[in-house]
């Protein structure tokens, strides 16, 4: 009887230990499946294809006069009170590869959640970006804004990408030669 009591006392620990190991293995397997699904979802080739191009228009609300456009090798700057101005600009192969890699890291050609769930707040002025990207024979377009105060994590990634590209553009001589903007938006 003493052995039976000992066995009954130890048995739950054995079952619990097995269950915990099984749960950990199942959890690990689920994480691996999620990673594989994301990897499969990202169909962007590892090497930048020759047809890679993009355009991003951005600004305040419907005033999206700023544009970086590799389809036409141009950059347009919003001069606010003085209209806008366009200049020819080209990225080096290394710059394009770097931009492509950043886009690939965020799986820009995959599904993006860009509409915030909280629409009870609105801000003025608000930022708005419109993107067009071509990769490996496929073209995707989308828009996001921070009009509803909140932005999704995907929109934050796009803002980071646009900021990264803007820094490259700001270092170009043809951009530095453009006039400064005068005035502001309310």
Image (tube, helix red, strand yellow):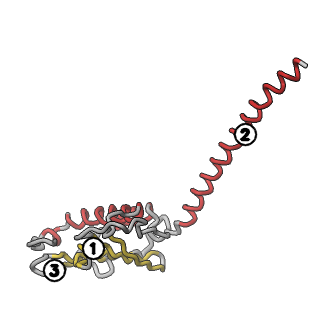
**Residue at horizontal 20%, vertical 63%?**
171
Mark drawn on residue 175: none
Q: Viewed as shown, does residue 31 lie left or right of 14?
A: left
Q: Secondary structure at mark 2?
A: helix
Q: Position of residue 98 (x, y in %)?
A: 36, 62
Give x and y (percent) for residue 53. Answer: 37, 76
Label annotation for residue 19: 2
Label pair 2/3, CB-CB below 8 angstroms: no
Where is residue 170 drawn, in percent x and y?
Answer: 20, 65
Q: Quadrant of the C terminus?
A: bottom left
Find residue 84 and name its label: 3
Q: Nearer the viewer, residue 6 or 22?
A: 6
Note whether 74 is above or below 7 in the view shown: below
Question: Seen from this angle, which residue lies furthest front?
Answer: 120
Mark found first going from the N terminus, 2 or 3: 2
**Residue carrying label 1:** 58
Q: Earlier in the sequence, mark 1 or mark 3?
A: 1
Label 2 Cα neighbours within 10 Å, binned few <14 / some 14-19 / many ≥20: few
């Amino acid at each position: 009887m003493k052995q039976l009591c000992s066995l009954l006392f130890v048995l739950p620990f054995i079952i619990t230990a097995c269950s915990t190991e099984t749960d950990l293995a199942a959890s690990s397997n689920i994480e691996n499946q999620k990673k594989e699904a994301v990897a499969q979802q990202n169909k962007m080739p590892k090497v930048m294809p020759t047809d890679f191009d993009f355009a991003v228009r951005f600004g305040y609300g419907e005033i999206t006069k700023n544009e970086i456009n590799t389809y036409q090798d141009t950059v347009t700057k919003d001069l606010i009170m003085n209209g806008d101005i366009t200049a020819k600009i080209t990225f080096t192969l290394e710059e394009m590869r770097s931009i492509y890699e950043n886009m690939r890291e965020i799986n820009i050609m995959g599904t993006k959640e860009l509409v915030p769930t909280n629409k009870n707040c609105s801000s003025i002025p608000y930022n708005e970006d419109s993107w067009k990207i071509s990769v490996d024979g496929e073209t995707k377009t989308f828009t996001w804004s921070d009009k509803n105060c909140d932005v999704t994590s995907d929109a934050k990634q796009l803002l980071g990408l646009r900021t990264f590209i803007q820094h490259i553009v700001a270092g170009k001589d043809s951009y530095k030669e453009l006039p400064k903007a005068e005035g502001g938006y309310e």
